Amino acid sequence: MAVTPWSSPLTERLSDRFTYVAGEFSTYAGQRFFTATSAILPALLEYLKTDESFDFLVDLTAVDYPQRAQRFELVYILYSYRLNERLRIKSNVAETEKPPTVTGVFAGANWLEREAFDMFGIEFAGHPDMRRILLPDEWQGHPLRKDYGITQMDNDWVRENLGIDSGQ
């Protein structure tokens, strides 16, 4: 991915205020992003919401890099209605790490964090209801992990609850 450096008054304010913003501020295909440690995410997102007008959490997703020590990359996408701009914040977390919830900043993070848990197995510390949201509670595994095979589904659950063979 060919990225270009991004410098603006916003990047200067973020650098001055948050010492745990890692890496550089960059753009790719017109999309602005930077990486921050997970510990500062609630404070960082609160600042971006209240002081910089990024008042809508569009999405929270993850990417699985099983070969990395910090296996998962969380991606928060914020939008500012006032500025008509998007901003992406990435945070790398280890498989055993529990990044802090941001439900206190954006109520909509509740379901997005539950989806990241359901699909990747990422648990968020302090989340008010950390349980599956898309798959049944009894489901085994997390389907969007790269080590979860495309034909690997919980065949026992399908047989028991749907009364059919999965066709795999």
Image (tube, grey):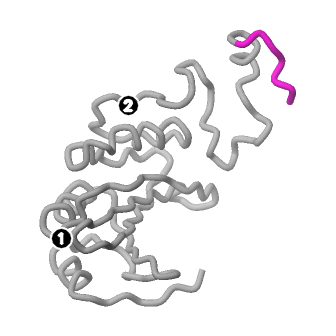
| Quarter assignment of residue 110 | top left
**In this orientation, which residue lies closer to the viewer: 117 or 98?**
117
The first of marks 1 and 2 along the sequence is 1
Which residue is denoted by mark 2 in the rendering? 130
Say whether residue 165 is magenta.
yes
Q: Estimate the x, y position of residue 1 in percent, counting from the top left.
A: 60, 80
Segment tinted magenta in the rendering:
162-168
User: Circle 2 — which element?
Assistant: loop
| Quarter assignment of residue 107 | top left
**In this orientation, which residue lies closer to the viewer: 3 or 82?**
82
Disc 1 packing (10 Å; few <14; some 14–19; many ≥20)? some
At a point 21% along the width and 70% down the height, the residue shown is 82
Q: CA distance from mark 1 to mark 2?
A: 29 Å
Q: Mark 1: which amino acid?
A: Glu
Closer to the observer: label 1 or label 2? Answer: 1
Seen as rendered, the residue at the extreme left is 51
Q: Mark 2: which amino acid?
A: Met
Please give the label number shown on residue 52.
Answer: 1
User: Circle 1 — which element?
Assistant: loop
At a point 33% along the width and 57% down the height, the residue shown is 38
Query: Are the residues tagged 1 and 2 within 8 Å (C-beta)?
Result: no
